[in-house]
Amino acid sequence: MKAIIGFILLLGILAGSIFTGEGMSALRPFLMAETMLATVLGTAVILVFTFPLKIIMESYRSLFGGIAESDNEMRNRVCELFHAAAHIGSSVGVIVALYGIILVLINIADMSRLPIRLAFALTALFYGFLISICFSAFERYIRYHRVS
């Protein structure tokens, strides 16, 4: 549960710092649905095809209830999934960002679309690294949080 609260606090701190510096209109570029979908769903799809569903479901449950102290094998598997998710999230963010940059370069003559495509690319990097940081924190939480 502490991991989820930490994730929510991280998002709140980021949104609060953006909001206080620029106002509500500054949050809009970070809420690009196509970038969010490509990065988050891309990470999820790769995880589903990489890990058994049992491990994925156990990792979800472990965030809310922890893993029993005696179940070291499951703890290691869940930590392996979170570790992989951190790497996959940042990699998918870079791939989606490269896709956005390719869109910029293909249509460089259309200067009116340049800012939105650059925002697409940079927001994908942002989400990829945010996913990476969160899953790294989840891994550390599961690795060191013991439930008796």
Image (cartoon, grey):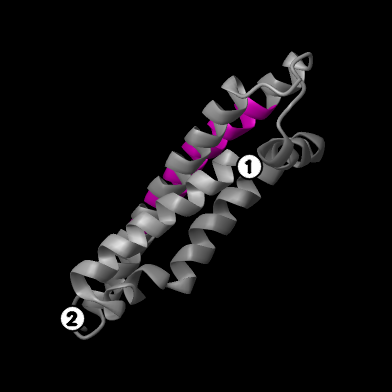
Q: Residue 13 at x, y = what percent?
A: 35, 55
Q: Is residue 122 visible?
A: yes
Q: Residue at x 58, y 34 (%)?
A: 82
Q: Is residue 93 left or right of residue 71?
A: left
Q: Residue at x 55, y 38 (%)?
A: 85
Q: Residue 92 at x, y = what percent?
A: 46, 49
Q: Which residue is mark 1?
A: 1
Q: Is residue 85 above or below residue 142?
A: below
Q: Residue at x 53, y 65 (%)?
A: 37
- Mark seen at residue 89: none
Which of the two labelled residues, at mark 1 and mark 2, occupies the earlier sequence position? 1
Q: Which residue is mark 2?
A: 109
Q: Residue 105 at x, y = what percent?
A: 24, 67
Q: Are marks 1 and 2 in contact (CB under 8 Å)?
A: no
Q: Tag 1's secondary structure? A: loop
State the quadrant of the C terminus.
top right
Amino acid carrying label 1: it is: Met
Amino acid carrying label 2: it is: Ala
Q: Is residue 111 left or right of residue 138?
A: left
Q: Is residue 118 left or right of residue 131?
A: left
Residues in magenta, as a range:
78-98
